[in-house]
Image (cartoon, coloured by chain):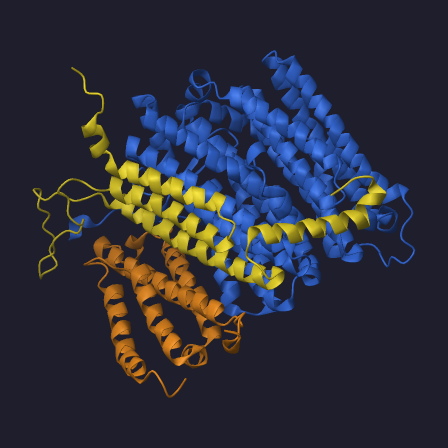
């Protein structure tokens, strides 16, 4: 009799489930939250989910840190019986983490400037101000052109 | 240890060209910051971009016979090491990007002085160089993850450059923020795709990826990777439903940045999309099994009509040009969806022609903004008569935007229509012409404002400074030149299209 | 500011040196154990940031002036790219560290990675401190008496 739920599949792919949940949480926060800082937080969660995906695919069962043992003379003796985890995804994601930091700080810097210019960091209020600006532009420039901006 | 000694043949300058063209601007950026002198920032930036342009021209000539150049960064051979790989497709895009960069900088000298506070000039040019490096790098590299790194270098500096428009209009800040959110989501989608490709194949070198995907055939991981990469890059390209960031970013950025972005940023992303769709994933996979054109054609048609239609009703000329860019991206996608050599060469040739055309138009608008203070049509009344040379350059490039015979725009649309007929899609061919009529309307509105309305009597407008006129005219003449001499653009586009359509075989070592 | 938080100030003074030393350890031991420029740079920056938090931004800016921070950011990248350019001038590929010791490529690799990581470390230190200065230096939107 075939099992209805393949538990081995579900448990065996736990890192993917976690990745998907985190990714969707992050993406949802970016879309649903009106506060600009919270959007950046969501973006961070979204990015971190990808970091975790990369890190988890580098894992090899029983694998240790991929550093060859070096004795005092500097001679390297690789031991074929030791299993090393795959360092490549980790290195890649180190780059992505740095990119993530740069993005976060740039985003926050923009928010600081937006707050100084608009006096708010709520998306709704900003949109309202921008709509008023557009309406003014329309009144000033649109009438003669027979349209709206 | 003598046994470890390798017989090394010293590399010459010519061997280093593929990497030098990325390294020179990369080196220029920190030098500008390190020296920290405003007077030296511009000369260094200009020298670096001119050098990059010369190098990309040499590279283009070298690969026009359909071959490729592979450069191993750090001496590590691919697929383990990072490879820079130049063939006709990316040499053409490299030449476009570095050419536009070189032409924009003299223009930027005046426009930056007028639009950006003095204390930011040094960092502006450093940022510009970083953006330039990123765009060149993501096109030149043959390593999938390296694409992401350079993509983020260019994107992050682009957000900063767009935000520089805040002096003029505070909406530049929110435009940059929107772009940051969308761009980051796009780039993150892209690396999710790469993670899946790596899981399925265990490699990140594009040529190697192509081989392994061709050997192993498709599976669900690879298909998911494809979806993530296309959507992620699609955000960067501003494919029709993912274009929301583009109009604001182009409208509120400083003029020089608008010129550079409009001509290069989306183009580099389109190149990456092409490279992944055709070289990494086999074209037969993408289209015959997955019938991707069912998705691409409606979106590109929507872009062509909806975005052009919206452009017609704009009151701000920069915003109008931005919507027109979205429409033109539709043409490029349509060329991809044709899936024949002609269609693909139409995409590549339009990529170059539209880059040149749009850059010239944005330059014209930027020059007029020096005197009008804004890009609203009302403020530009009659400026074409007051600034005859600027106006004439805008007319020439405007005609190219429509696709009038004898201009660059005509060539790319002509090839696109040919490609449609090759597939027997005559309805699409008619659609291309109809949407060109919409372009006639919005370009005509621009001409009307520039020439047929009375200039504001109080306007102090006079001809734009020479440093702006020369770049503008270089591009305007290029618009006409490429309309007659198609050897360079169309010739290399055809070679590139053949290379891309060969799929993974085109990437073989 | 100068008369309270005595414990914090004393502890910070003791910690800053240790943090810097640890940064150098992570930096230069990076080729034998986990570590390297990114981590060391952040740790080094932490030393300045904690100093700034406890003693005030102006004190931190006296120790590590903003103009110097900007130069260091550029210097690190220059060092990194410069290593590549030197290897190119020696007739090898960009960033091919074998160039530094053609007869003992492993020594060349050692030197190359050390210099490149040093460049990374300098830039990361600079960038992290610069980010801190940029955010902390903004006039606070709310004054103390507004609470």
Where the N terminus of chain C falls, by quadrant? bottom left
Q: Do we see residue B405 in this rendering?
A: no
Q: In the image, is residue B440 above or below residue B428? A: below
Q: Chain C is shown in which shade?
A: orange
In the foreground, B224 or B370: B224
Residue B39 at what x, y percent from top left?
62, 68
Left or right, A7 with reference to B339: left
Q: Splitting the image into 4 quarters, where does residue C101 fall?
A: bottom left
Q: Splitting the image into 4 quarters, where does residue B302 fall?
A: top right
Residue B112 at what x, y percent from top left?
66, 59
The number of numbered badges drawn on the structure is 0
Q: Residue at x 46, y 53 (%)?
A: A38
Q: Residue at x 55, y 48 (%)?
A: B178
Residue B248 at what x, y percent from top left?
63, 46
Q: Do we see residue C141 in this rendering?
A: yes
Q: What residue occupies the far top of the structure in this picture?
A: B424
In the foreground, B9 or A22: A22
Chain in blue, by letter, is B
Q: Splitting the image into 4 quarters, where does residue B95 fall?
A: top right
Left or right, B25 with reference to A139: left
Q: What residue occupies the far bottom of the structure in this picture?
A: C3
Q: In the image, is residue B402 above or below residue C5? A: above
In the foreground, B160 or A127: A127
Q: Chain A is shown in which shade?
A: yellow
């Amino acid at each position: 009799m075939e099992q209805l739920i393949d538990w081995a599949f579900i448990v065996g792919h736990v890192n993917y489930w976690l990745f998907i949940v985190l990714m969707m949480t992050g993406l949802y926060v970016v879309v649903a939250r009106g506060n600009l800082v919270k959007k950046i937080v969501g973006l961070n969660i979204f990015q971190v989910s990808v970091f975790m995906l990369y890190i988890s695919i580098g894992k090899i069962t029983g694998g240790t840190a991929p550093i060859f043992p070096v004795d005092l003379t500097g001679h390297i003796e690789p031991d074929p019986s030791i299993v090393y985890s795959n360092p490549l995804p980790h290195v890649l994601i180190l780059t992505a983490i740095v990119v993530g930091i740069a993005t976060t700080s740039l985003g926050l810097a923009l928010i600081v400037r937006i707050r100084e210019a608009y006096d708010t960091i709520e998306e709704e209020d900003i949109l309202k101000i921008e709509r008023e600006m557009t309406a003014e532009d329309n009144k000033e420039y649109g009438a003669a052109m027979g349209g709206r901006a | 240890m003598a046994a470890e000694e390798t017989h090394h043949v010293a590399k010459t300058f010519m061997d280093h060209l593929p990497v030098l063209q990325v390294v020179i601007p990369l080196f220029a950026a920190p030098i500008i910051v390190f020296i920290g002198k405003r007077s030296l920032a511009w000369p260094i930036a200009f020298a670096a971009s001119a050098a990059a342009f010369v190098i990309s021209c040499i590279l283009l000539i070298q690969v026009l016979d359909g071959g490729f150049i592979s450069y191993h960064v750090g001496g590590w051979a691919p697929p383990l090491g990072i490879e820079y790989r130049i063939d006709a497709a990316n040499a053409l895009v490299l030449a476009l990007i570095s050419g536009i960069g070189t032409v924009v900088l003299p223009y930027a000298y005046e426009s930056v002085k007028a639009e950006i506070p003095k204390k930011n000039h040094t960092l502006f040019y450093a940022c510009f160089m970083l953006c330039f490096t990123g765009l060149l790098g993501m096109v030149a590299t043959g390593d999938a993850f390296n694409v992401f790194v350079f993509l983020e270098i260019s994107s992050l500096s682009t957000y900063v450059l767009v935000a520089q428009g805040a002096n003029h209009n505070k909406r530049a800040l929110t435009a940059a923020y929107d772009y940051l959110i969308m761009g980051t989501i796009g780039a993150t989608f892209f690396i999710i795709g790469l993670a899946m490709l790596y899981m399925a194949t265990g490699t990140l070198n594009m040529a190697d990826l192509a081989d392994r995907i061709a050997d192993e055939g498709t599976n669900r991981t690879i298909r998911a990777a494809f979806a993530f990469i296309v959507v992620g890059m699609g955000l960067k390209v501003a494919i029709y439903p993912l274009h929301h960031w583009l109009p604001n970013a182009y409208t509120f950025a400083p003029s020089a940045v608008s010129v550079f972005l409009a001509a290069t940023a989306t183009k580099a992303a389109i190149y990456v999309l092409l490279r992944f769709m055709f070289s990494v994933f086999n074209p037969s996979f993408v289209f015959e099994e997955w019938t991707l054109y069912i998705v691409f054609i409606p979106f590109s048609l929507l872009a062509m009509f909806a975005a052009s239609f919206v452009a017609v009703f704009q009151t701000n000329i920069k915003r109008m040009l931005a919507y027109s860019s979205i429409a033109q991206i539709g043409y490029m996608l349509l060329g991809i969806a044709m899936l024949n050599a002609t269609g693909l060469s139409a995409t590549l040739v339009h990529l170059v022609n539209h880059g040149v055309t749009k850059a010239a138009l944005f330059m014209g608008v930027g020059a007029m903004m020096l005197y009008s203070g804004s890009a609203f049509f009302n403020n530009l009344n009659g400026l074409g008569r007051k600034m005859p040379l600027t106006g004439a350059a805008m007319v020439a490039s405007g005609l190219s935007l429509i696709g009038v015979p004898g201009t660059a725009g005509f060539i790319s649309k002509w090839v696109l229509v040919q490609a449609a007929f090759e597939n027997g899609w005559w309805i699409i061919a008619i659609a291309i012409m109809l949407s060109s009529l919409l372009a006639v309307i919005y370009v005509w509105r621009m001409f009307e404002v520039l020439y047929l309305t009375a200039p504001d009597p109080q306007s102090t407008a006079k001809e734009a400074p020479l440093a702006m006129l020369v770049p503008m005219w270089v591009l305007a003449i290029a618009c006409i030149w490429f309309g007659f001499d198609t050897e360079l653009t169309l010739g290399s586009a055809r070679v590139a299209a053949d290379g891309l359509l060969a799929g993974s075989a085109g990437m073989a070592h | 500011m100068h008369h309270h938080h005595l414990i914090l100030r004393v502890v910070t003074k003791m910690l800053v040196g240790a943090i810097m030393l640890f940064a150098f350890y992570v930096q230069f031991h990076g080729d034998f154990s986990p570590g390297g420029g990114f981590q060391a740079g952040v740790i080094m920056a932490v030393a300045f940031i904690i100093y700034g938090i406890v003693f005030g931004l102006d004190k931190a800016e006296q120790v590590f002036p903003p103009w110097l921070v900007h130069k260091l950011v550029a210097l690190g990248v220059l060092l990194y790219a410069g290593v590549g350019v030197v290897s190119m001038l020696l007739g090898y590929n960009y960033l091919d560290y074998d160039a530094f010791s053609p007869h003992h490529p492993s020594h060349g690799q050692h030197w190359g990675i050390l210099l490149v990581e040093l460049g990374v470390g300098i830039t990361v230190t600079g960038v992290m401190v610069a980010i801190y200065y940029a955010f902390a230096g903004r006039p606070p939107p709310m004054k103390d008496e507004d609470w």
